[in-house]
Image (cartoon, grey):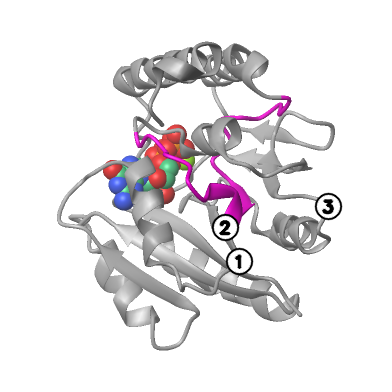
């Protein structure tokens, strides 16, 4: 039987592309026999993203969770997972801006279905993966971010944000919604056994605005520090 999964797509001002993305996802689900649902978590986007998703709920495998204001990407993913259908066996996350290639989703699902892997991560930093049209500065920041997390995990692309994890791997795990990198929280804390990285070529957003800023870089460093402290001194940390 096909693995039931819910993939959360947090949105803030993604009206320009959300319909095309959800139609593309529905097509991938149907043509690969995947039992997936998309959960859009919209933070009352001023551009009306939430209303577009509400309209599409009647015809596509998607539900929308509306939050009152911009509460952050990571907490959006966590709230989306709580909103997911309870019988989903796996939970995932994906950005709304087409950076994450939908076409590798079937491989990610198959990895979990095989029973060999508890986590599948879309990866730019293994052979076959890559990045399209990012400024050099952005690539350097991303690679340094991954390098800094290297001692915590064997995974090359910890900042990917595109992943699928078995639900039970999150049981009892306290995820800190700090900053942008919920994927890193899951990779560093969840009990998933073996992980598979599936290569994809990341494409920079074509519509909408980037939200990466200095504050997010600072938050990432704070998140890393907390993860290292928890790893090195587990007895001093409650979660
Ligand atoms: N619900 C919600 N979604 C958010 C928030 N911040 C970002 N997002 C969404 O999270 C996803 C990733 O954000 P991006 O702005 O693409 O972040 P990025 O990929 O690091 O940077 P760019 O692609 O350059 O913009 C997108 O789908 C955003 O719409 C937020 O505060 N709340
Ligand atoms: Mg993006």
- CA–CA distance in space, label 3 to label 1: 15 Å
Mark positioned earlier in the residue sequence (1 or 2) = 1
Residue at 30%, 77% (x, y): give it: 54
Q: Residues within 10 Å of mark 3 (few under 14, many from 20)?
A: few
Q: Residues within 10 Å of mark 2 (few under 14, many from 20)?
A: many
Q: Which residue is mark 1?
A: 89
Q: Residues within 10 Å of mark 1 (few under 14, many from 20)?
A: some
Q: Which residue is mark 2?
A: 167
Residue 74 in the image: above or below residue 82: above
Tag 3 and tag 2, C-beta contact below 8 Å = no
Q: Which residues are magenta?
A: 154-177
Q: Which residue is mark 3?
A: 116
Dominant secondary structure of the residues highlighted in magenta in the image:
loop
For label 1, the SS is loop
Residue at 67%, 44% (x, y): give it: 192
Residue at 44%, 68% (x, y): give it: 84
For label 3, the SS is loop
Tag 3 and tag 1, C-beta contact below 8 Å = no
Mark positioned earlier in the residue sequence (3 or 1) = 1
Magenta includes 158? yes
- CA–CA distance in space, label 1 to label 2: 5 Å
């Amino acid at each position: 039987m096909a693995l039931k999964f819910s993939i959360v797509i947090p949105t803030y001002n993604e009206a320009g592309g959300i319909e095309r993305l959800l139609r593309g996802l529905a097509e991938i689900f149907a043509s690969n026999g995947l039992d997936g649902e998309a959960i859009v978590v919209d933070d009352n986007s001023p551009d009306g993203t939430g209303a577009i998703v509400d309209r599409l709920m009647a015809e596509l495998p998607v539900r929308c969770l509306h939050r009152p204001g911009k509460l952050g990407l990571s907490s959006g993913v966590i709230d989306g997972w709580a909103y997911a259908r309870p019988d989903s066996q796996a939970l995932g996350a994906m950005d709304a801006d087409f950076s994450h290639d939908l076409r590798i989703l079937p491989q990610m699902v198959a990895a979990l279905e095989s029973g060999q892997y508890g986590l599948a991560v879309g990866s730019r930093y293994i052979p076959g993966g890559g990045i399209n049209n990012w400024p050099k500065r952005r690539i350097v920041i991303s690679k340094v971010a991954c390098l800094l997390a290297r001692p915590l995990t064997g995974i090359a692309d910890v900042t990917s944000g595109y992943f699928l994890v078995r639900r039970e791997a999150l049981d009892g795990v306290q995820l800190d919604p700090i900053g942008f990198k919920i994927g890193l929280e899951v990779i560093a804390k969840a009990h998933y056994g073996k992980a598979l990285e599936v290569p994809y070529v990341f494409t920079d957003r074509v519509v909408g605005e980037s939200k990466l800023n200095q504050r997010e870089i600072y938050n990432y460093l704070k998140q890393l520090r907390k993860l290292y402290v928890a790893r090195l001194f587990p007895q001093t940390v409650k979660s």
